[in-house]
Image: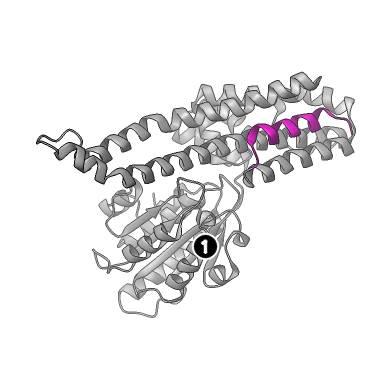
Amino acid sequence: MGVFDDLVGQERAAALLSRAASAAAEAVAGGRGAGMTHAWLFTGPPGSGRSAAAKAFAAALLCPDQGCGHCDLCHQVAIGSHPDLESVRPEGLSYSVKQTRELILRAAGAPTLGRWRIVLFEDADRATEAAANALLKAIEEPPPRTVWLLCTPSPDDLVITIRSRCRVVTLATPSTAAVAHVLATRDGVPPDLAEFAARAAQGHIGRARRLALDEEARRRREAVLSIPASLTGVGECVTAAERLVKTAEEEAASATAELNETETAELRKVYGEGSSGKGLNKGLVRGGAGALKELEDKQKSRATRIKRDSLDVALLDLVVFYRDVLAVQLGAYDIELANQDRRADLDRIARASTPEQTLRRVDAIMQCRERLAANVNPQIAVEAMTMALRSPS
């Protein structure tokens, strides 16, 4: 079973990448390697498997058998320990020019094992403008054996000067049946639960896996989808907004608390906390104050990103809910309802409103997403949204 066999519903992309891996092997052997290039851009909707496809391609480039899936090199790529693979995933709100320049320096080295030096940059759309300019220079004049693999939801998320120098690999949204099959066969999820999770996630593989394996994730989804029917007054709108924001904050705190503690303890140890000797501990810790402050800023940015991501998942669940309402209102029986498990709520809201009102509610949710991305106070942005969801105007 090769590395591309794990890509769910991406047969065309897998075929393209497999051909490119063969061309890359030809180039390593001294041939022309037509079809291989030094910069690739993986695009597709959230959950389509952009980073998985990029990692599979990295394994195919580094493996002598173009991604056999079972050799030591493929295993090293899978667990992130291959010396010639640099994986980057911005944890905070953005990726700075300082971080990008450090990354470019690391990428400029010759391959340790003689094939390729690969940089896999997830969420490359989070690079700041200055970082993008630095990245452009690296992609324009790369070392002969360096390959850049960039991942973004859309080509438009990167400046045109970068994407024009990349070969674009477009991933499709996997079908419900394909995702359910993966959950059932690879994760051992019961068929009924696998189908529910795949349908609810609408092709988002990671989200489907969380819904199938994590009862808490299913509970959070239920809480979000109960909101439309609960918005009967101003007080209920405010309460619903508070609950959404508080849940996102709790999730961010839970996801970062242990990691923050470990990072802080390790940094304090590096700067001498706990060392013996008169004046040693105090002096070294004071010398590391700047590093500790930088770490705290990084941790705050990471928590804010997780909070935003958590809120965004909830907002997208609401968008899909109202899309289902619209399908019921228009009698679009050929459209699969993601929220079939809440059919009674869908029917009730569909009868009590018009398609025009449903579309305005979807617009209100999308506007809330835009406001959150623009750093509007989450409580204010979400309250405005819940009020608009209640309003028939």
Could you say which is closer to the camera, residue 341 or residue 223? 223
Q: Is residue 83 above or below residue 202?
A: below
Observer-nearest of 293 and 231: 293
Q: Residue 367: where, in percent of width, then height?
A: 73, 43
Q: Residue at x 58, y 21 (%)?
A: 219
State the residue position of label 1: 41
Task: Say whether residue 142 is left or right of residue 215.
Answer: left
107 sits to left or right of 343: left
Of the pair 89 and 41, the residue shown nearer to us = 89
In which quarter of the view is residue 176 placed? Answer: top right
Q: Position of residue 271 (x, y in %)?
A: 22, 42
Residue 258 versus residue 235 in the image, above or below:
below
- At label 1, the amino acid type is Leu
- Closer to us: 139 or 383: 383
| Residue 166 part of the magenta segment | no
Quadrant in which residue 204 is drawn: top right
Query: SS at mark 1?
Result: strand
The quarter holding residue 157 reads bottom right
Label 1, residues with CA under 10 Å away: few <14, some 14-19, many ≥20: many
* Image x and y of residue 371, in percent: 68, 43
Q: Picture coordinates of residue 5 (x, y %)? A: 45, 50
Quarter holding the C terminus is top right
Q: What is the span of residues highlighted in magenta in the rendered image? A: 376-393
Prevailing secondary structure of the magenta residues: helix
Evaluate whether residue 379 shows in this view: yes
Instruction: Determine the residue located farthest toward the left in the rendered image.
Output: 277
